[in-house]
Image (cartoon, grey):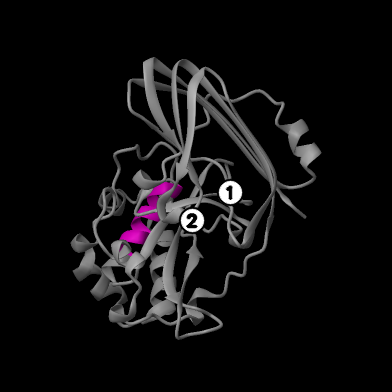
Amino acid sequence: MPLTLSARFAFDLEHASDALLQFEAARTREQVILSSDTSFTSCESVNRIAAQDDIGERVWIRGEGRVDVRYSATLAVSRRVPPVESLRALALHLLPGPTVKYLLDSRYCHPAQFVDFADAEFGGLEGGAKVAAIRDWVADHVAYTPGASDSATTATDTFHSGAGICRDFAHLFVTLARACSIPARYVACFAPGVTPQDFHAVAQVYLANEDDPQTGAWHLVDATGMADLEHAAIIGVGRDAGDVSFLTSFGPMRFVSSKVCVAHEPAERAARNDNTPVDDSQRLA
């Protein structure tokens, strides 16, 4: 059954300024957009540009005052998610150029700080077995705790606090994978199974292709354990959340509300459900 998505959010721009958004499901080989509709209010300009690694699009908007964004889509998602434990790593010197940046430090992920820890904790494992161990370690040592972090929280902060939301789980997983010399990137997505429903964050690691071990491929991993990865709709990817934020303002801004719905159901039923009032207390996972 097709995956139906809807997202609504609103924010106030104190004066005429620009904002960069990324919130729509990407068009990829594994996820076909059957229908979609996006609308903005109070925008004098809307300009679409390619997103990181050419996965999805970012939207430049210029506006003033309250901006309401509404998005709905129906997708056919066809993705195989092999058991990550069965995959082997690729030799670093054989990695393709675009993967190299996903081995390095970024704004929220500082793998250089964790090399000794990662070697002590996961050093006896290889490839996908090491990835699975990192995923399980994060799941066992971080409690899903709304409100425990904010937009400045790094993976190092989460490591020490032991609490966070999906963004923090993904950042810590990515950081530990990179500390083990495994390319890892942050993935923003819509995913069935996530509670509470919201924009969700998972990760991808670059390991051998299941069908051709001599080549590499990106494989989804969710340290929260909530997402149905076979049917998740990827929005975009990046080094960390800074590269794929659903909203980045370049002027004074006040966030007002957000509501997300992800379901396996007929599009007309999802549309009816989307008429419910927006809960202003809901914030991003």
Q: Secondary structure at mark 2?
A: loop
Is 112 colored magenta in this rendering?
Answer: no
Relative to 268, does residue 93 appear above or below in the rendering?
below
x then y, percent, for residue 7 = 60, 35
Q: Marks 1 and 2, how far apart in space?
A: 9 Å
Q: Amino acid at mark 1?
A: Val
> Few, some or many C-alpha atoms within 10 Å of disc 1 (few <14, some 14-19, many ≥20)?
some
Q: Amino acid at mark 2?
A: Thr
Q: Are marks 1 and 2 in contact (CB under 8 Å)?
A: yes
- Tell me, yes or no, if residue 285 can be seen here: no
The circle drawn on residue 194 is: 1
The quadrant holding residue 260 is top right
- Tell me, yes or no, if residue 250 can be seen here: yes
The overriding secondary structure of the stretch rendered in magenta is helix
Decide if residue 91 is on the left or right side of residue 265.
left
| Magenta segment boundaries in residue numbering | 166-176
x then y, percent, for residue 87 = 47, 80
- Residue shown at 41%/48% (left/top)? 167
The circle drawn on residue 250 is: none
- Residue shown at 36%/60% (left/top)? 174
x then y, percent, for residue 24 = 56, 42
Is 172 colored magenta in this rendering?
Answer: yes
- Quarter of the image with the N terminus is bottom right
The quadrant holding residue 149 is top left
Q: Which residue is mark 2?
A: 224
Relative to 169, does residue 61 appear above or below in the rendering?
above
Mark earlier in primary sequence (1, 2): 1
Q: Secondary structure at mark 1?
A: loop
- Residue shown at 37%/64% (left/top)? 184
